[in-house]
Amino acid sequence: MNRSIITELKSRLIAGVGVASVLLVTSGAIAAPQLVLVDAKVFTADPALPYAQAVAIEDGRILAVGSNEQVRALIGPNTRIIDVGGRLVTPGLVEAHVHLGNELPTPPLAMLNLPFPGPTGEQALAAVEQAAKTRTDWIYAYVGPLVARDQRNWRKALDLVAPNTPVFLRGFWGHTSIVNSEGLRRLGITENITDPLGGWWGRDENARLDGRAYEAAETITPRIRPLTPQYLATAFGAAQQRYARWGVTSIHLMNNDKSLEVTLAGLAAAKPAQKWTVYSWGAWETPIERIPDAWAMIDAAAKQALAKVRVEGPKWMLDGTPIEQNSLQRNAYSNRPGWRGRSNFTDAQLREILKLALDRPTQLALHVVGDAETDRLLKMMQELAPISVWRAKRVRLEHGDGIQPDNTEKVAQLGLVVIQNPTHLSVPIAGESLASEHMLLKSFIAAGIPLALGSDGGPREQNPFLNLMLATLNTAEPAEALTREAALMAYTAGGAYAEGQEQSKGRVAPGFAADIAVLSQDVLTIPAPQLPATTSLLTLVEGEVIFEDAVFSSAK
Ligand SMILES: [Zn+2]
């Protein structure tokens, strides 16, 4: 078989030559594909041919998409043929926002196992007091919003029940941590510590540390448990297996409190099965003057990343969340008169970050949750550069919870990509109104805003089909629910677009990477409550099988 013909064929396929005419050209004339999937319901995420019956794969790429007859005509003696029995075949899913490897050490103090929204202050203190009777080393626990919003002096309260034992309480969603005096002592944190860029230390009326670490000040966590490449390799490896069973072929890792170096070493040790894109955390406990150097290191790493690993720019946390009530809102929080949250950066600092983004080649990602913080960002972007310049930068808005109807047009014009996390739609606490008035989804698409979906959750919430259910119900605002097709589009082609890879992956289309999932059930039609039980039966990354259910492996 003549490679040049294949090359020519591929370039024609990539150029968008119609599938049927190309298949006529290739039929019987050149080498057969390595693998074909037939008798499928193929959701292609490709507007040129939204649905098909069969796919041919060769050399890690999709060679052809079309009817069973067209694709069967390409089969050769060495082609593996998988009859998927009418099941749904989709582009491999893109998990567009997840944090991995930053869990608290195990075994921690048993997570205070109380109904959501978590323990009250008194319950947390009682549990710590009990644990302190027998322990001399760190007591850790995740806590919920009731503790996070409890404005008492936590350092003093914990010192009373654990005077000699270090205690570390962390919000399960990040953004806030609480340490007692013994904990501060062991961490080497003294009264004269200065606030890091993008975060702050809580202080009482006498300017004494009150035990609370907010936002970037939370980088104390890794000092408690050093994150080694080996530790991360285990966490990344487990995540790869989990995701492979859900048909996820790309993972956008929000790298939080880990250095890029240790994360890349961890990924290398885990041997990437999926395609990873790493967004580093934009706070390095460094002064703002040093940020250009840190960003330059990211740019350098992006040029020499491992196979299957991409490195993009920093992710900055511009504000907090409604859970601890630090996202910056237009209106005061309903149960905390006068408090609208706060920004993590001054105007001057945010301007510096945005100006740097204009200069650097890697992509900028911004955690923005509050509607007022969204207003501030959009205004500043418009002041700093013309819309056309920003469009080319394709800045990511992680979450987008705070984009209100009066801002969708501006967001679309600036070319911002919204990565929404359907798990956030179920966060509102019983009896409490949402921090922002609207939780949009459908309106993003209507306004022409590119949309990707990610879980922003732990191992259970990472299930893309749970997120598909949440996005298509949007219980926070049902009128803003997505259709199943729109949600699946956001989870595939939308995710590829969010990282600038829409020309090579995220669709089942000729010339695209053969990143594909065969699903156990038709997620486009089954009743919503059944969605989370969906699994992948066959997951391919560039044509390589990374997960295969016995139903297919036994039929080889
Ligand atoms: Zn997140």
Image: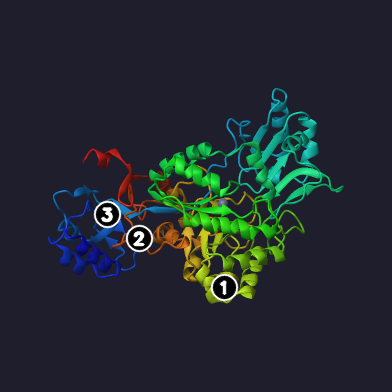
Taking the image as drawn, is residue 372 in sight? no
Identify which amino acid the numbered label 3 is placed on. Answer: Asp
| SS type, badge 2 | loop
Looking at the rendering, in which quadrant would you find the N terminus?
Answer: bottom left
| SS type, badge 1 | helix
Q: Is residue 262 left or right of residue 337?
A: left
Q: Residue at x 50, y 42 (%)?
A: 266
Q: Is residue 138 left or right of residue 556?
A: right
Q: Is residue 275 left or right of residue 400?
A: left
The correct choice, above or below, for 106 with respect to 250 in the image is above
The correct choice, above or below, for 417 with respect to 122 in the image is below
Horizontal and vertical percent for residue 533? 40, 44
Most extreme residue toward the top is: 134
Q: Reading the chain from its start, which is encountered first: label 3 or label 1?
A: 3
Q: Reading the chain from its start, which is encountered first: label 3 or label 2?
A: 3
Q: Marks 3 and 1, how far apart in space?
A: 42 Å
| Residue 59 badge | 3
**Neighbour class for label 3 at 10 Å: few (<14), some, many (≥20)?**
some
Horizontal and vertical percent for residue 355? 62, 68
Q: Quadrant of residue 434?
A: bottom right
Q: Marks 2 and 1, how far apart in space?
A: 28 Å
| SS type, badge 3 | loop
Mark 3 or 1: in front is: 3
Q: Nearer the viewer, residue 65 or 465?
A: 65
Taking the image as drawn, is residue 430 in sight? yes
Mark 2 or 1: in front is: 2
Q: Which residue matches tag 2?
A: 507
Q: Nearer the viewer, residue 478 or 196?
A: 196
Q: Which residue matches tag 1?
A: 410
Identify which amino acid the numbered label 1 is placed on. Answer: Lys
